[in-house]
Amino acid sequence: MQKSLITTISDRYKQQDFDSINSKDDLRPADIRRLCLELGIAIIASYFLQKLCVIVSFYILRSILSAGLSADSTAFTFLKYLLSSISSYLPKICIFAVLYHKYKPLKRLDTQYENKSYYPLVVIPAMFAFAMWGSNITKVINYALQAFFGAGAISSVMEGMAPQSIADGVVILIFSSIVAPVFEEYIYRHLLLRPLKIIGDTPAIILSALIFGLVHGNFDQFAYAFLSGIILGLMAVRYDSIIPSIILHIINNFFVSIVTYQSRLTGGGELWDSIVNVAATFGNFIIDISYYAAPFVAVFLAFCGMAKLTPIGGKQKYKKMLAVFSPVLIISFVVLLLQF
C-alpha cells in the first residue's frame, strides 16, 4: 500500500519529455502540477535566502557605521539602498533562473501576438488607473481593519522612506525609478512569467502579478503592485519582451516618486526646482486623468483586443486549471503573507 501511495503521488507530478510536446494543448495536468510545485519551492527558497542576505547586509551596515560614516549622510543612504537591492533581487534572480532555464525549451510553444500601434496609448493610462484602484482598495481595507477590528492604520511605505535631503531624494529616485523597475521586470516578467506561460497566458499574468504583490511584504503596496503587475505582465506577453514593461514601469515609478516627494526634492536651485515642479505637475495630470478615466480605460482595454489572450486548451482543460493550486505553492503564499 505504501508503494502504491508513493507511485500515485509520483505519477501526479511526473512530467513529459519536453521534446515530445508540440503544442500547449499536449500538456497534461501533471506537467502544470509539477511546475507549480517547483515554483512554490523556488519562492520559499528565495524568501529564506533573502532573509540571510538581509542579515549579512545589516552587519555590513553596522560595520560601516562603526567605521565612522554618519547614518544621516547621503553615502550611507546610497549604501543602504544598494545593499537592500542586492538582498532583495539577487536571491530571486539565482533561484528563479533555475526554473527559467528548465522550462526555456517550451518557449517555442508561445503564442506570437499581433499588436496595434495604439496599444501603448491604452496601457499607459491603464497602468496608472490600475495603480489608483490598488491605492483605493488599500484605503478600503484600511478603514475596514480599523472599523471592525480596531487595528491601527496601515503604514505608508512611501512616507516611511521619505528622503531627508535633496541628495537623499535623488538616491531614492534612482533606485525606485530605475534600479527597481529594471530588476523587477527581469525577475517577475522574464524569469518568472516565462515558465508560467505554459499554463496559459492569462493565468500566468495573474499568478506572476500575485507573487509580485506578495513579495512587497506589506498591505500598503500589495493591491497596488498586484494590479500594476497585471498590466506589466500583459505588456510582456503581448510584445514577447520586457523592454516595453520596463519603460512603463520606469514611467510609473518616476512620476509617483516625484509627486510623493516633491516637497522633499525642491530647494536645490531655481533650475532644479523648476524641473521637479514641472515633472510633479505632469505626474499629477497623468494620475488625475487616469483616475477619472479608469472605468473607460478598463472597458476600452477589454474590447480593443489587447487583453484577448490564448486560453488553456486541449484535453482535461479544467483539471489543468485546478492543477495550478499546488499545496506547496499555496504554502509559499502563506510564507509571503507572514511578512505582512
Image: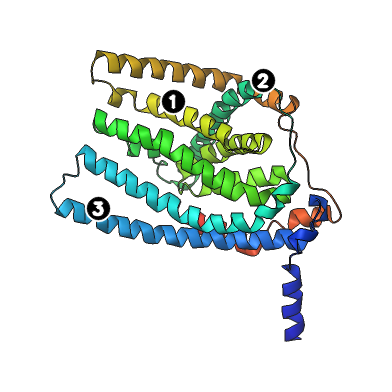
Q: Position of residue 83 (x, y in %)?
A: 33, 49
The residue at the point 73 percent across, 68 percent down is 14
Q: Position of residue 179 (x, y in %)?
A: 42, 39
Residue placed under numbered mark 2 in the picture = 118
Q: Is residue 317 above or below residue 269?
A: below
Q: How many marks?
A: 3
The picture quadrant where one finds residue 96 is bottom right
Q: Residues within 10 Å of mark 1 (few under 14, many from 20)?
A: many
Q: Secondary structure at mark 1?
A: helix
Q: Residues within 10 Å of mark 2 (few under 14, many from 20)?
A: few
Is residue 210 in sight in this rendering? no
Name which residue type carries label 3. Answer: Leu
What numbered label is drawn on residue 61?
A: 3
The picture quadrant where one finds residue 164 is top left
Q: CA distance from mark 3 to mark 1?
A: 30 Å
Name which residue type carries label 1. Answer: Phe
Q: Is residue 273 above or below residue 160?
A: above
The residue at the point 70 percent across, 56 percent down is 324
Question: 274 or 90: which is nearer to us?
Answer: 90
* Left or right of 305 on screen, residue 91: left
Q: CA distance from mark 2 to mark 3?
A: 47 Å
Q: Position of residue 31 (x, y in %)?
A: 74, 61
